[in-house]
Image (spheres, rainbow, N blue to C red):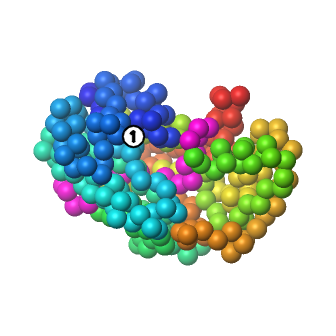
Amino acid sequence: MRILLTGPTGQVGSALLDTLPSLGEVLPADRSNLDLSRPDSIRAAVRAARPDVIVNAAAYTAVDSAETEEALAFRVNRDGPAILAEEAAKLGALLVHFSTDYVFDGEKSAPYVETDAPDPLNAYGRSKLAGERAIQASGCRHLIFRTSWVYSITGKNFLVTMLRLARDGQPVRVVDDQRGAPTSSRMIAAATAEALTKLGEHPGLYHMSAAGRTTWCGFARTIFREAGIPAQVVPIASSDYPTPARRPRNSVLDNGLLVTNGIRLPAWESGLQEVLSTNA
């Protein structure tokens, strides 16, 4: 199996670079030779690789910046995946794509299932939803995985930010009225590799997040406890921490469809412990 992997230096991409070689030959394509904002580079890279599977881990993920760079977010998150899907269809290849909990408005009280109607609150969510729909409309075989609150020990994410703030020795103010399931990039990569062996005959849209739920404040407290850092966490409301992009109050995803196909992600606490212990 030849696997073309986009975004191999990102959080999810770098984790996939560790897990996918067990399934076949991995052909990493970074932005220098496959730029999702440049259609010609996408087509050239796919046609040169002639993969059996395309795993798209590249994306525009700057949620707040997307409010003023919406056109760029759509080029990367909608137009780029649309071209990948078009090329995959021509090759008969499977396209694996990652989306987000931010396609929902967060007003539902229960976890979101795949059939719930999306209603994004921000430009990033709109661009990711547009990417999902472009892939679905292409006719290519695809697996779309919606993830939530993705983090790793490197890059720009909540875990890295909390560890940096704790070093300052000041109280850390964290939003406590948004809930979701922190999901490590390692967990996503492991589940994706498993999905490629189990879902080949079941293409479609799946929710893929860690089990359980917490708030950003609860996540921060658990980070500091597991890392052995005596930081003071102060819970605040979303209104006390205004951001350019609105966030959904409820980002919890129901993974039942994935579970019925034999793929179960661990609890978010376990994922955090694994990340911190591996990088201790």
Q: Quadrant of the C terminus?
A: top right
Residue 122 on image: x %, y %: 47, 70
Q: Relative to residue 221, is residue 30 depicted above or below?
A: above
Rendered location of residue 168, percent (x, y) = 80, 46
At x 49%, y 72%, the residue is: 121
Q: Quadrant of residue 160?
A: top right
Residue 196 can be seen, yes or no = no
Identified by mark 1, the residue type is Gly
Q: Is residue 56 above or below residue 274?
A: below
Residue at the image position 39 percent from the left and 43 percent from the top: 57
Direction from residue 186 to residue 280 in the image, left or right: right
Q: Is residue 265 left or right of residue 206?
A: right
Q: Give the number of callouts.
A: 1
**Is residue 209 rendered magenta in the image?**
no
Question: In screen coordinates, is 31 left or right of 151?
Answer: left
Relative height, residue 39 to residue 179 (above, below): above
Q: Residue at x 39, y 45 (%)?
A: 58
- Specify the quadrant that holds the N terminus: top left
Name the residue carrying label 1.
7
Examine the structure image and report whether residue 148 is included in the region drawn in magenta: yes
Mark 1 surroundings: few (<14), some (14-19) or many (≥20) residues within 10 A: many
Query: Which of the 4 image quarters holds residue 214?
Result: bottom right
Question: In what element is the residue under mark 1?
Answer: loop
Image coordinates of residue 247 in percent, x first then y, are 56, 68
Residue in the image at 46% along x and 68% along y = 67
Residue in the foreground of this view, choosing between 238 and 164: 164
Q: Kindly tell me whether residue 126 is visible in this rendering.
A: yes
- In the image, the segment drawn in magenta is 134-155
Image location of residue 71, percent across then percent down: 34, 64
